[in-house]
Amino acid sequence: MPTHPGAPTQARRQFVGFDLEVATYARLKPELLCRFPGKFVVIVGDEVEGPVETFREALRAGYRRFGLGPLFVKQILTVEPVVEVTRDIVPCRS
Amino acid sequence: MPILSLHFDHAGRPMLELYVGVSTAEAEFRPPCPPVPVRALVDTGASKTNIGRWVFDRLGLSPVSQVPVHTASTGLTPLLADVYAVEISLGGVMTGLLATDLDVVAAEELSGSGVETLLGRDILGRGLLIYDGLERRFTLAIEPPGDPHN
């Protein structure tokens, strides 16, 4: 199967939810807030890549290290902003 | 800067055609994939752009984060929603890139017939929107994103 130049040869990782990544971020957040406020980190399982300056850099760093598949990208903030949608939609959570 | 001037649709809504594609970052690591055309509602009530999940399935994307979301029916406790990274461009007569690596919220279902995407203030905040109710048309001018290769 032909691959894009630079593409990792391993198969795309499956998405099984972000419970582990959420726990990893919660555990590391106090230290990350102290040292790297406003920066972005990428978490897969209990492994962390970063910090980096932008969301795009976080994506690139994540795909480079972990390959294609789900990433848990977070900007290190004291309070996470809540998305507001005034329509009655159903948010998707796998 | 592309400037769109369109009439409201038959239901009186400011709708436009967009293309949703793989983010620039992910595109470096996978074969090309054609973008998906979607019908988008200009929604100043959405702080971030929301896209129906079927679009991400069509593009073969995986989520890149999770965010809390308040909607008209969530009450005091926000729900968690998956976040995907995409590229968004204008479709139809006027073309142009709107975002290269935009984090958007996945919606299981978007209420309102014919609406497949809610174009939120994350995009609208980079331009000018004029809503002319008397003439039943709207004008939208969005600053293009910076160089995606920087």
Image (cartoon, helix red, strand yellow):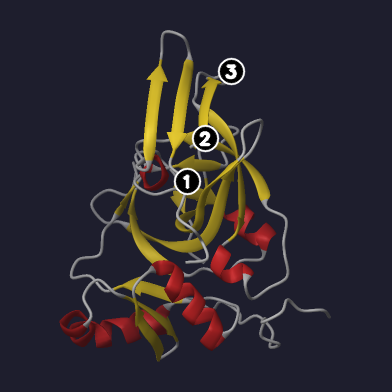
Q: Chain of mark 1?
A: B
Q: Nearer the viewer, residue B47 or B89?
A: B89
Q: Decide: few, some or many residues near mark 2? Use Cα within 10 Å; few <14, some 14-19, many ≥20.
A: some
Q: Chain of mark 3?
A: B
Classify mark 3: helix, strand or loop: loop
- Do pointers 3 and 2 mark residues of a single chain? yes
Do the numbered discs 2 and 1 sit on residues whose CB atoms are within 8 Å? yes
Q: Decide: few, some or many residues near mark 1? Use Cα within 10 Å; few <14, some 14-19, many ≥20.
A: some
Spatial separation of the CA atoms under disc 1 and disc 3: 29 Å
Q: Amino acid at mark 3?
A: His
Q: Which residue corresponds to the image point at 26% horizontal and 59% vertical from the top-left?
A: A81
Of mark 1 and mark 3, the one earlier in the sequence is 3
Q: Is residue B73 above or below residue B105?
A: above
Q: Which residue is mark 3?
A: B10
Q: Which mark is on residue B144?
A: 1
Classify mark 1: helix, strand or loop: loop
- Residue lying farthest to the left in this orientation: A34
In the rendered image, the quadrant that contains the N terminus of chain A is bottom right
Q: Which residue corresponds to the image point at 40% horizontal and 82% vertical from the top-left?
A: A21
Q: Which residue is mark 2?
A: B2
Query: Dividing the picture into quarters, in which one does residue A12 lie?
Result: bottom right
Q: Amino acid at mark 2?
A: Pro
- Do pointers 2 and 1 mark residues of a single chain? yes
Q: Decide: few, some or many residues near mark 3? Use Cα within 10 Å; few <14, some 14-19, many ≥20.
A: few
Residue B107 x, y percent position in the rendering:
50, 52
Spatial separation of the CA atoms under disc 2 and disc 1: 8 Å
Residue A74 x, y percent position in the rendering:
35, 73
- Do pointers 1 and 3 mark residues of a single chain? yes
Q: Is residue B24 above or below residue A70?
A: above
Q: Amino acid at mark 1?
A: Pro
